[in-house]
Amino acid sequence: MFGEKMEALESEKWFVDSGDGGCLIKWKTRHHLKPGHTHVPEEESKSLKELSVKFLAATEAYLVAHPHVST
């Protein structure tokens, strides 16, 4: 999708205390489309979200394995 329909993807994530020792991830994404494109098809949007979830899971695994990095 990048290069064809989208110029940029802006993603903001923040973590909120869930009250039980964990957290919730709040997520906002903005798609900056090229001229002539008016929306991101649901299937492509879902695919981008799945990639982001995998990235967050890999980041979490790294931080758990290397706790000194986040202090």
Image (cartoon, rainbow, N blue to C red):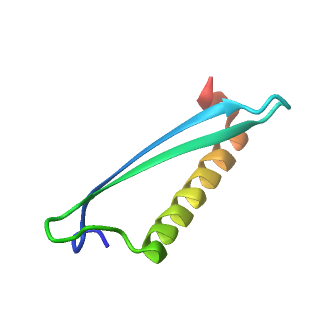
- Quarter-wise, where is residue 69 in the image? top right
- Quarter-wise, where is residue 50 in the image? bottom right
Q: Quadrant of the N terminus?
A: bottom left
| Percent position of residue 33, x then y | 24, 62
Decide: is 6 above or below 21.
below
Residue at coordinates 43% horizontally, 50% vertically from top-left? 29
Q: Residue furthest right?
A: 20
Q: Residue furthest front?
A: 38
Q: Residue furthest left?
A: 35
| Percent position of residue 25, x then y | 63, 42
How many numbered marks are there?
Answer: 0
Q: Quadrant of the C terminus?
A: top right
Residue at coordinates 66% horizontally, 31% vertically from top-left? 16
Nearest the eye: 58 or 22: 22
| Percent position of residue 7, x then y | 22, 60
Residue at coordinates 25% horizontally, 67% vertically from top-left? 38
Decide: is 17 above or below 9.
above
Residue at coordinates 14% horizontally, 65% vertically from top-left? 35
The answer to whether residue 24 is left or right of residue 27 is: right
The answer to whether residue 62 is left or right of residue 47 is: right
Decide: is 6 above or below 23.
below
| Percent position of residue 17, x then y | 72, 29
Nearest the eye: 57 or 37: 37
The answer to whether residue 30 is left or right of residue 5 is: right
